[in-house]
Image (cartoon, coloured by chain):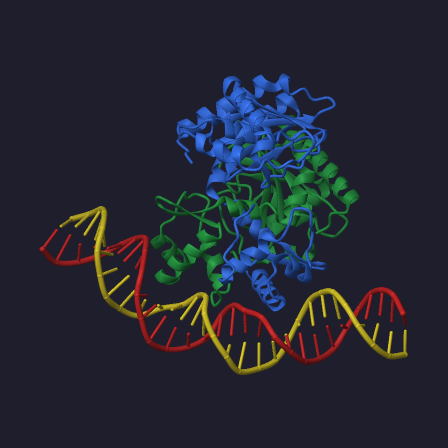
Chain colours: A blue, B green, C red, D yellow
Amino acid sequence: MTGPADLDTVLGKAVTILRAFRAEDRAVSLAELVRRTGLHKATVHRLSGDLVANRLLERVDGGYRLSGGLFELGMLASLERSLLEVAMPFLQDLYERTHETVHLGVREGHDVVYVAKIGGHRQAKAPSRTGGRMPLHCTAIGKALLAYAGAGLRREVLSGPLERRTPHTVVAPGILRRQLQRVTETGVAFEQEESAVGLVCVAAPVLGRGDEPLAAISVAGPSHRFRPEGHVTAVRAAAAALGSTLRRRDLLR
Amino acid sequence: MTGPADLDTVLGKAVTILRAFRAEDRAVSLAELVRRTGLHKATVHRLSGDLVANRLLERVDGGYRLSGGLFELGMLASLERSLLEVAMPFLQDLYERTHETVHLGVREGHDVVYVAKIGGHRQAKAPSRTGGRMPLHCTAIGKALLAYAGAGLRREVLSGPLERRTPHTVVAPGILRRQLQRVTETGVAFEQEESAVGLVCVAAPVLGRGDEPLAAISVAGPSHRFRPEGHVTAVRAAAAALGSTLRRRDLLR
DNA sequence: CACTTCGTCTCGTTCAGCGATACGCTGCGG
DNA sequence: CCGCAGCGTATCGCTGAACGAGACGAAGTG
């Protein structure tokens, strides 16, 4: 549920066009953009031209695609960037200890946004992407963030509809609440194929000075061989170390 | 030298405002944005409001900062994303073998744009940033890209002014040309404190099907202890492995 | 207190953006 | 071979969104 941009302004329409792109597509045709955005054909045509001129979009054979200029801009976003810079060494350590897919995520609304994802050749094929979103309630990172967040947010999420992603997604508020309770007791959150079939995960929150966790770190692997319990200590240690570093450097939300 | 956006359109001005942000600043005030962009105060004020409404900008105490929404958009940029996804395991391997800062970069104009930078706790403090730019002629990655690029580009760069970044930057076209020649013979490029004092580096090109290299990989470290010659084999192997994977999957420019 | 700097807001003008419409091209089915 | 549909592109008046000069209060500074 990404907020609806203001369609009465040029800027809003431009952003709408940009957001119409999805991770899976290489190039999107004009007609397809018209379909996805609901904007007038002539408008999309003209604005796309402007976006190309401003290096946010590129022309390719099949239509348009988001350009490297946008990538450059995005990597300037301050919070994500500073978090990533500080966190990277800790994520590397964690990867070396586990050799499984390591995630760093922050909360945005009722979603987790992945700020980093690192993995090796034998990594589980997870739906997560750096810069991608997943609902809080069905991921280990999300649960870690939720468990340590304010009661208000927790109530919001628990009372809202809990989208089912797989047969294992926890959609019963009561069960989820108990799981979250357990997270605060143990300091780690688990996910058992709740966001994607075949994927299990363990996460720990990165706590700052404020009430809300700054981020969360997770280790994920394929369910057929990966035992998340085995990595509890490593994840917790990584998150704690990152947290104390962030607190020392005073990088608050 | 980032291309000048069209200032006669709303979109151009908006992008100009976004590009006015630099990596080092947490928050930028309205007045500062006015100074940097040269736009009218009222215009910046209004457009900033629109940008906030569209989640590309955030209000913070000290003014504005680029928001997480922009980060999300940027990570959708197709070329960078697909390259990153395929490359990550190889970069991880390289990091584990060297435990030094590993870069992945692509060419854009006469610059290299870093698509990834991974490093541990003892990493050299380099000016490079994921999403950041450096001139081709003063970095190992840049030289690797340049040496294997078309003769036209090489001539362009060699004939243009070679910006001096440190006392060690190679600014003589003749010397640089000979270095590039050597790169094609050995398959690796070196940098000896040419982009930043205290930083040395070795890089290898990632070759695709086409004429131009798709990217380049480098390992960097602090000059006082890091011997780039010791990592020639590792870098070359990583770049070759990534190249053949990309060729197999047919991810062209 | 005088002066500057900053953020915000107003307002009349005007031109950039709007969308209906048209056109040429391509591919496809009849 | 023709007809049609879908696509990208171009045209063109109309209109309201964006423009920038300027006013204003708040806060800081000497």
Residue nearer the viewer, A247 or A172: A172
Residue A114 percent location from the top left of the image: 57, 37
- How many numbered marks appear? 0
Q: Is residue B18 above or below residue B190?
A: below
x 46%, y 54%: residue: B51
Residue B57 percent location from the top left of the image: 45, 49
Residue nearer the viewer, B54 or A109: A109
In the rendered view, does A225 fall on the left or right side of D2?
left
Q: Is residue A2 above or below residue A29?
A: above
Residue A37 visible, this angle: yes
Q: Is residue C3 above or below residue C15?
A: above
Residue A214 percent location from the top left of the image: 47, 32
Residue nearer the viewer, B120 or A177: A177
In the rendered view, does A237 fall on the left or right side of B49?
right
Residue A37: quarter of image: bottom right
Residue nearer the viewer, C15 or A249: C15
In the rendered view, does A11 fall on the left or right side of B151?
left
x 52%, y 43%: residue: B195
x 41%, y 58%: residue: B37
